[in-house]
Amino acid sequence: MPPSVKFAVIPVAGLGTRFLPATKAVPKEMLPIVDKPTLQYIVEEAFSAGIEHIVLIQGRYKGCIEDHFDTSYELEDTLEKRNKTADLEMVRKIARLGPITSIRQKAPLGLGHAVLCARPIIGDAPFAVLLGDDLYRTEANKRSGIGQLIDAFEATGKGQIALMQVPLSEIHKYGAAEGKVDDKNERLFHISDLVEKPPKGTEKTDRAVVGRYVLPPRVWGLLEATKVGKGGEIQLTDALDALQKEQGLMGVTVDGKRVDAGDKLGFLEANLREALSRTDLKSGTVTLMQELLAELK
Ligand code: G1P
């Protein structure tokens, strides 16, 4: 049996240009979905799946991310004095989610390079990678998105990446995986080729890489050997294509709903879905949506 997956890497070094001006002074990972920063959903997904240590790969000016997951003495003291017990407990819970270490990516050299920055902390162990733009909603009694990949890794010993079928006209925005569906489990896919953002007109598959990975430590060496690729950056996808050739790689279609919160419409969708899942907001949100639609008629 492969060793269990205890570490997760979450790259948060992006500039967030798609959300300017909101991201001029606030990292995009701190933009809220209803009332909680996007990154907190991802951190909770990882810890709920059994991850014991998260490594954040930071860019510049991201101190507020560390503050968010730290104890906030002044806020807690004020809430306590005002007898705001529920708020106090909610704030305290964030600092207790689990150990989170931050590392600086000193130059924006790409996702592959960002992930490689976690090597000194993780060492010779398998690890998960969660990208902050991809949010997964799974049913309450089901494993979280990354939890489903961890289960597949522990069952097969092979690296796992989350895949989703998208319209062929959209595949140029994603890592693209060729291969074949497993004979016994239609959610599993045996990857035979992986290309980062294939140019329009060269599409060969509609299976897109969507923000979750569970990888063996062999990836470190492959990342070190990876040359600059698409967009002049060191691409994780290129290292994973090398991994696929060497020891196989599988795709998992996550049982749940994935939303791209890195896209403006996806971000709105994530907010609406979250609001509709909250008992205190559901009926108000439905009424609001109905009113807005009626106004358009
Ligand atoms: C990254 C990956 C890409 C993947 C995408 C969505 O690209 O490089 O392979 O399909 O995330 O998870 P980005 O959207 O950061 O350019």
Image: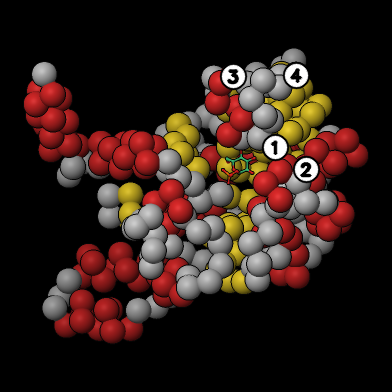
Spatial CA distance of label 4 from label 2 is 19 Å
Residue at image mark 2: 238
**The residue under label 1 is which amino acid type?**
Glu
Of callouts 4 and 1, the N-terminal one: 4
Q: Earlier in the sequence, mark 3 or mark 2?
A: 3
Q: CA distance from mark 3 to mark 2?
A: 21 Å
Chain-order first, disc 3 or disc 4: 3
Distance from label 3 to label 4 (Cα)?
A: 17 Å
Rendered residue at 39%/51% (across/down): 19
Q: Amino acid at mark 4?
A: Lys
**Residue 160: % across, % down:** 71, 38
Of badges 4 and 2, nearer the viewer stands 2
Quickly name the residue at label 1: 196
In the rendered structure, the answer to whether residue 160 lies left or right of residue 259 reads right
Q: Are marks 2 and 1 in contact (CB under 8 Å)?
A: yes
Q: Which residue is mark 3?
A: 168
The secondary structure type at the circle numbered 4 is: strand
- Mark number, residue 180: 4
Mark 4 vs mark 1: give the one in front: 1
- Asked whether residue 7 appears in the rendered view, the answer is no
Write the residue at 39% across / 37% down: 266
Q: Is mark 1 within 8 Å of ligand 1?
A: yes
